[in-house]
C-alpha cells in the first residue's frame, strides 16, 4: 500500500468505553501518529436494540478524557445501511455472491444434522448454483458470499504472524439479511474500504473475522488492509478481565481519581514494551511505538501498578493542573467524602498552598481530596475515630496550654517559627514532641495523619487554627 497510513477505532455503543477498547484506541492512535497518518472513529451502531446515545456519549467523552483525538468526522455505521446493501447486490451482479432462499426449517434441519454428527454448523451451499426462478413462493432471500471452497485463506498478521484457514472450513456467510439489513461482516469491510483504512488494529477475538473479511475484500476486488490482532487484557488471576476484577470502564477510572496521562501510560505498557522503560511522555510514546514490540500473550491488569504510576504522575503534575483535575471530579466524588461539589476562592488558595505536601502522599485524586479534608471542612470539625482517640482529657489539657503559646505568635506564621514554638513548649512541659503534635493535629485536621503539621498550620492561618483549637476544647 502506498499513501497515507489510516487506522480506525470502531467501538459498538452498547455501554461504556471498556478499558480494553481504550487500549485498542490508544494503539491505533499511536501507530497513526508515529507514521504521520490518520486515525478515524466509526461508531458501529447497527445493533439498534442495544446501541444507545448515552453509550455513544460515554465513548466520545472517554476518548477525549484520555487525550485521544481522531481525524475527520465521526462515521456512524447504521447511517450507511443503503451503501452496504448496494455493495452486496453488486457482488450478486459479478457472480461473487448469490441469493439464498433456504427456509428457516431447512436451516434448522442443517443445524440439527450438524449437531447429531458432532460437527460445526456450516451452510451446505444448496442455493449456490441454483437459479432464483426456482425460488419457493413467499420466501425473502438473503445474499450469501460465494466463498472459495478449496485452497486456503492466509492473513499475514503484524502481531500474530501468518494465520491460515482452510477454505473448506469456511462456508458461504450471509452478507445481507432477508429484511435488507447488512451483517456485521459486510458492513465492516465496506466501511473500512470506503474510509480508506490501510491498517486494522483490534483485539485478537476478531482474528477469525479476519479470514471472513479477507474473503469479502477479495470478492469485491479490493486491496486487503494490513491487520494486527492484539492480545486481550486479563485480570490479575489470568482470567479475561470482567466485572468481578473491578472497574471496567474508562469513566470509572476517572471517577476513582486517576489522571488520563497515567492511565494512558499504563495502557501502553499492557502488551507492549520498549526495553525496560516504564514511564513515557506522550511524545516518547509516539516516537517509539511499533507493533513489532506487541506480544502475543494476554496482558495482565495490575491495579497496584496503575496506582503507583498514578502517584508518580500526581507528584509531577503542576499544582494548578491538579487543582483543576480535583475540581473536575468534585461534583460526583465530593459529597460522599464530606467535600463540597465546588470550592470557593479561599479554599482554592489554601489548596494551592498545601498542594506540594498533599501530593507527596496521594496515589489518586480521591486520596488528594481526602488528604485535603482539613482545608475544606466546615467548623466545628467532625474528628474521625483515630483523631478522637488522640483527644483524651490529657490531650485536651495540652491543647489548652499550647493554645496560649500560639496566641502569642504574631499574624504572619511560618513553618519554622511554629515548629520552634511547639518544640520549645514541649521541652518546658517535659513532653515529647508527639505528645503535643498528635492532639494538635487531631484538633486542626480531624484526622490522625496529615501533611506536615506546621505546614498545615501555615496553610490554615492563625485565626482558623486558634478557632479550631477553641472548638475542640469547648466541645470536649
Image (cartoon, grey):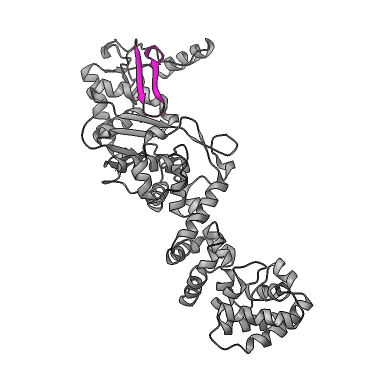
Please tell me which residue is depicted at 30% across the width and 16% down the height of the picture: 146
In which quadrant of the rendered image does the N terminus lie?
top left
Of residues 34 and 246, which is closer to you in this image?
34
Please tell me which residue is depicted at 64% across the width and 78% down the height of the picture: 380
Answer with the quarter of the image where residue 374 lies: bottom right
Instruction: Give the residues in magenta.
Output: 151-169
- Residue 188: x and y, percent? 33, 32
Please tell me which residue is depicted at 53% across the width and 12% down the height of the picture: 118
Please tell me which residue is depicted at 34% across the width and 33% down the height of the picture: 200
Q: Residue furthest right?
A: 393
- Residue 67: x and y, percent? 37, 51
Q: How many marks?
A: 0
- Residue 198: x and y, percent? 27, 33
- Vertical arrangement, residue 408 with respect to residue 154, above or below: below
In which quadrant of the rendered image does the C terminus lie?
bottom right
- Residue 149: x and y, percent? 34, 11
Of residues 438 and 21, which is closer to you in this image?
438
Amino acid at each position: 500500500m502506498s499513501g497515507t497510513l489510516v487506522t480506525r477505532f470502531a467501538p459498538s455503543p452498547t455501554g461504556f468505553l471498556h478499558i480494553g477498547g481504550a487500549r485498542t484506541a490508544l494503539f491505533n492512535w499511536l501507530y497513526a501518529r508515529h507514521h504521520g497518518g490518520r486515525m478515524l472513529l466509526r461508531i458501529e451502531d447497527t445493533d439498534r436494540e442495544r446501541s444507545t446515545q448515552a453509550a455513544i456519549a460515554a465513548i466520545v467523552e472517554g476518548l477525549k478524557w484520555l487525550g485521544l483525538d481522531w481525524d475527520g468526522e465521526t462515521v456512524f455505521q447504521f447511517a450507511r445501511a443503503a451503501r452496504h446493501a448496494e455493495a452486496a447486490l453488486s457482488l450478486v451482479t459479478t457472480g461473487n455472491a448469490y441469493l439464498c432462499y433456504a427456509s428457516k426449517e431447512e436451516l434448522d434441519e442443517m443445524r440439527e444434522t450438524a449437531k447429531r454428527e458432532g460437527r460445526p454448523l456450516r451452510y451446505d451451499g444448496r442455493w449456490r448454483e441454483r437459479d432464483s426462478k426456482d425460488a419457493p413462493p413467499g420466501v425473502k432471500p438473503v445474499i450469501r458470499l460465494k466463498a472459495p471452497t478449496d485452497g486456503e485463506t492466509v492473513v499475514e498478521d503484524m502481531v500474530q504472524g501468518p494465520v491460515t484457514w482452510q477454505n473448506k472450513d469456511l462456508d458461504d456467510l450471509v452478507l445481507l439479511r432477508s429484511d435488507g439489513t447488512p451483517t456485521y461482516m459486510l458492513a465492516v469491510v465496506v466501511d473500512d474500504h470506503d474510509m480508506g483504512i490501510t491498517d486494522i488494529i483490534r483485539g485478537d477475538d476478531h482474528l477469525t473475522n479476519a479470514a471472513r473479511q479477507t474473503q469479502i475484500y477479495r470478492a469485491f476486488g479490493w486491496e486487503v488492509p494490513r491487520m494486527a490482532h492484539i492480545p486481550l487484557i486479563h485480570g490479575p488471576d489470568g482470567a479475561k478481565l470482567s466485572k468481578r476484577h473491578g472497574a471496567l470502564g474508562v469513566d470509572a477510572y476517572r471517577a476513582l481519581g486517576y489522571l488520563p496521562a497515567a492511565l494512558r501510560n499504563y495502557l501502553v505498557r499492557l502488551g507492549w514494551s520498549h526495553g525496560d522503560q516504564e514511564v513515557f511522555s506522550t511524545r516518547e510514546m509516539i516516537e517509539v511505538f511499533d507493533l513489532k514490540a506487541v506480544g502475543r500473550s494476554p496482558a495482565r491488569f495490575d491495579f497496584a501498578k496503575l496506582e503507583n504510576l498514578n502517584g508518580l504522575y500526581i507528584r509531577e503534575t503542576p499544582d494548578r493542573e491538579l487543582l483543576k483535575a480535583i475540581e473536575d471530579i468534585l461534583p460526583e466524588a465530593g459529597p460522599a467524602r464530606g467535600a463540597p461539589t465546588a470550592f470557593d476562592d479561599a479554599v482554592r488558595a489554601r489548596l494551592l498552598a498545601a498542594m506540594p505536601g498533599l501530593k507527596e502522599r496521594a496515589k489518586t485524586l480521591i486520596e488528594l481530596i481526602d488528604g485535603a479534608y482539613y482545608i475544606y471542612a466546615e467548623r466545628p470539625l467532625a474528628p474521625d475515630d483515630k483523631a478522637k482517640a488522640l483527644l483524651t482529657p490529657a490531650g485536651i489539657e495540652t491543647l489548652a496550654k499550647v493554645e496560649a503559646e500560639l496566641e502569642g505568635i504574631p499574624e504572619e506564621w511560618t513553618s519554622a517559627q511554629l515548629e520552634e514554638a511547639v518544640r520549645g513548649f514541649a521541652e518546658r512541659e517535659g513532653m515529647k514532641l508527639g505528645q503535643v503534635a498528635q492532639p494538635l493535629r487531631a484538633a486542626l485536621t480531624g484526622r490522625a495523619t496529615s501533611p506536615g503539621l506546621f505546614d498545615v498550620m501555615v496553610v490554615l492561618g492563625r485565626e482558623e487554627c486558634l478557632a479550631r483549637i477553641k472548638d475542640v476544647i469547648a466541645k470536649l
